[in-house]
Image: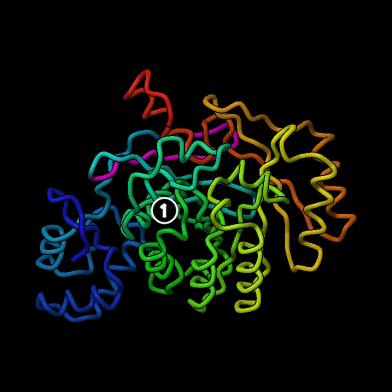
Amino acid sequence: MPATHPNIAPRIYELSRTALAQWCQEHGAPGYRADQIRRWIFGKRANSFADMHDLPASLRALLAESFSLFPATLSEHRVASDRTEKLLLQLDDGELVECVLMREPDRRTICISTQVGCAMGCVFCASGLRGLKRNLTTGEILEQVLRLDRLLPREEAITNVVVMGIGEPLANLRALVPALDSLNDKGGLGLGARRITISTVGLPDKIRELAQIGKAYNLAVSLHAPDEATRNRLVPVNAKIGLDAVLAAADDFFAITGRRVTYEYVLLSGVNDAPAQARQLAALLQSRVAHVNLIPMNRVSELTFVEPTAPRTREFVRILTEAGIPATVRKRKGADIDAACGQLRLHQLELATPGLTPP
């Protein structure tokens, strides 16, 4: 049985379809009940085992005794003027994690977290200002998805998932991969692997491990600089890895999966937004099948970085596109509700521990 807080029953979706079928059989129910249960959770948006009315009453009672559905506490729910919604969830052990629903005319994209805090130490990101506490479990990852899914009206569904919330996803593949399997499974959300994007600061061995899984997930590498010195400053873990090793692993990912790699680049005024740096980036990626996603810096009160001016951003894009590198600027979502990664959690932690400064 999956580990959980001693006072909380395990989330039922911690179990794979096969494991749930086995549990049913061990408790006197046919294995096909597992498919019915998963349809209720992932397809029909059941909020309790009592809702699963096509199951025998005895089985519903046993499920309620043995498992939980949504044990996390909703600490905060914010809705932005652009209808972006952000949830701050308090987990079994009191830790906080956040997730976001973003609405576009033709998409319903969610952003989910994989860890409590982050060990990567990117200097422009709120997620790691208090360090890494622990990995999330498969169930804790899936609870974010299921809660966000229930914010949508019946006629709408999640269309895309980006694993770009708090934490380094590839540092928690053991829990993330089974969660993605449930999203990808027809008995789960039935979401195609090509609609799931996994972000990473660039852990070479883990990038290759992800590629070998055999699913067509999208990979987004958080590059943020075209040279070692600048990347070492912005992404401290780079000093131990090196830009060449990250790019070589991304090349291997493309060779194995055939999926174009996206390179994320947070634009920081006066740090990595110079035309010369755009030309360096173009030279770095010119021989690669790549896309650059430029991200305007989200202001974090604890940090001094700011985004460049609009003309400066347009010039950066122009240099890349003229060099043949596809480049887009990410549309900012939920700016008025601290929707950027880790901001809401950080503010809650500061309220709980006033005067405590980040490490």
Extreme residue in the right direction: 322
Q: Secondary structure at mark 1?
A: loop
Q: Tell me where the magenta segment starts and ends, as one range.
A: 77-92
Where does residue 113 sit, x and y in percent of width and height?
Answer: 43, 50
Residue at 57% x, 36% y: name it: 334
Tell me if residue 103 comes above or below residue 46 in the rendering: above
Residue 164 location (% of width, % of height): 52, 51
The quadrant of the image that shows the C terminus is top left
Is residue 9 on the magenta stretch?
no
Q: Position of residue 241 (x, y in %)?
A: 56, 58
- Residue 205 is left or right of residue 178, and the answer is right
User: Which residue lies under the disc numbered 1?
Assistant: 114
Q: Position of residue 71 (x, y in %)?
A: 24, 48
**293 in relation to 125, above or below:** below
In the shown orientation, is residue 91 left or right of residue 217?
A: left
Q: Vertically, is 96 above or below 107? A: above
Is residue 50 in sight in this rendering?
Answer: no
For mark 1, does the 10 Å Cα neighbourhood hold few (<14), some (14 to 19), or many (20 or more) residues? many
Residue at the image position 73 percent from the left and 51 percent from the top: 226
The image quarter in which residue 33 lies: bottom left
Residue found at x 57% / y 51%: 239
The outermost residue toward the top is 355
Foreground of the two, 127 or 181: 127
Q: Nearer the viewer, residue 126 or 47?
A: 126
175 up-or-down from 348: above or below: below
- The kind of residue tagged 1 is Thr
Is-magenta flag for residue 91? yes
Q: Which residue is drawn at the image coordinates 84% and 50% (left, top)?
A: 279
